Structures are given as C-alpha cells and as structure tokens.
Image (tube, rainbow, N blue to C red):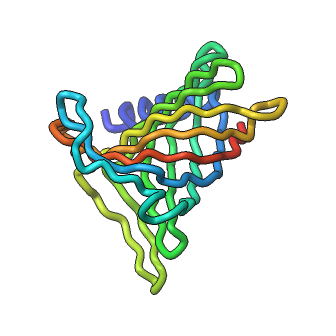
Amino acid sequence: MKKTFIVLFLILALVPSAFGQFRFEIGANAPVAAGFITGDGTLYGDYLDVIGSAGLIPIPNLALLLQANLGGVLKIGAGVKAQSILVASIAYPTAQIELSLGALSIDAGIGGLYFGYYALGNLYGLETQDLLLPELSVWLGLGKRHSFRIGGGAIGILSSSLDISEVPFVGYAGFKVVLE
C-alpha cells in the first residue's frame, strides 16, 4: 500500500515536468504606495505615498518556476520567489498564473506559509507563518520575445484563513527580465 502511494506521488510529481518548462525572472520593484483595503472594497484612510515619504527604493527580486503553457495565452506555474533589501532576503513558495495578450501580460500569484530568510550577521532560518502573499501585476514586454518587461502591480498580506476584513497592500512599479 505504501509503495502504491509513493509510485502515485512520483507520477503526479513527474508528469507535469514532462510538459512544463522552467521560467526564471529577475528584476526590481519600487514601492510607490501602501495602504489597507477593507472588506467592502474601500481604500482605508491612512493611504501612504511611499515615494513622497521615503523616495524611490528598488527592491531586487527573482523567481524560479516550473510552468505549463495552456494554449499559448495562459501559463500556470509553481516555484520559489525571493525578495531582498540587500541586507536581508526572504524566499517563499509561490503559484502563478499569467495571461499573455501579445506584449501585455497580466500575472496573478499567491505565495507564502513557509518562509526562508537570510540577513547580515549570519542570521538565517526557515519559518512557518500564517500568511499568504497575493500579488497582481500588469507588464508590458519589450523586444522581439517580450523578455524585458516594465509594469506595476500590488502585493498584499492575508492570513491563511483568507480573512479580507482589512488587507494591507503595497503598490509598486518595476521591471524584470523573464527567461523561458
């Protein structure tokens, strides 16, 4: 019985990789706004203009995903995403869906629950947190293969219970290079 589960797990793990491809993203996002959205969709009163108060601070990021192409327009993938503020970095598992409309692409993803971190001073570890990081972004691809992209989006913080009574978010503008 145990062998059957192991074989079934291996089949489920390896079959998608036969039809998938790796996707590597590297770029930087600069926060431009932060705030809260309440459960009824209204913007909370303490909306913060990040550029006006802190200036333009790019945050390097990268992602490595195994993705499947579903008909040329829709791609779905799962992998690891990392964000860094140079003296500290955090990585977490993520799932992503991309809708490609020519040079324009719309990405939606969610990640979290498990976080690996590293900070100067040799501080590192792996933590389990009751947090999900939903993200929605729009990108304009430049060049023949649309590999260099500029755009923007928002990333929020949710508890894993999906309580949306108050959702903090950060809006950002950025660029990235996508290698598929």
Left or right: 91 as drawn, with respect to 177: left
What residue is rendered at 75% in x and 32% in y? 146
Q: Camera-side residue: 81 or 152? A: 152
Residue 143 horizontal/vertical position (percent): 82, 34
What residue is rendered at 57% in x and 41% in y? 65
- Which residue is the extreme one toward the front? 52
Residue 140 horizontal/vertical position (percent): 66, 32
Left or right: 108 as drawn, with respect to 24: left
Total marks shown come to: 0
- Which residue is the extreme one toward the bottom? 121
- Tell me if residue 62 comes above or below residue 103 in the rendering: below
Quadrant (top left/top right/bottom left/bottom right) for the C terminus = top right
Q: Camera-side residue: 7 or 140? A: 140
- Tell me if residue 77 comes above or below residue 166 in the rendering: above
- Tell me if residue 128 comes above or below residue 143 in the rendering: below
Residue 83 horizontal/vertical position (percent): 50, 58
- Which residue is the extreme one toward the top? 71
Where residue 1 sits, quadrant-wise, is top left
What residue is rendered at 74% in x and 37% in y? 147
Where residue 155 sits, quadrant-wise, is top left
Left or right: 97 as drawn, with respect to 22: left
Where residue 14 sits, quadrant-wise, is top right
Residue 102 horizontal/vertical position (percent): 70, 19
What residue is rendered at 84% in x and 30% in y? 144
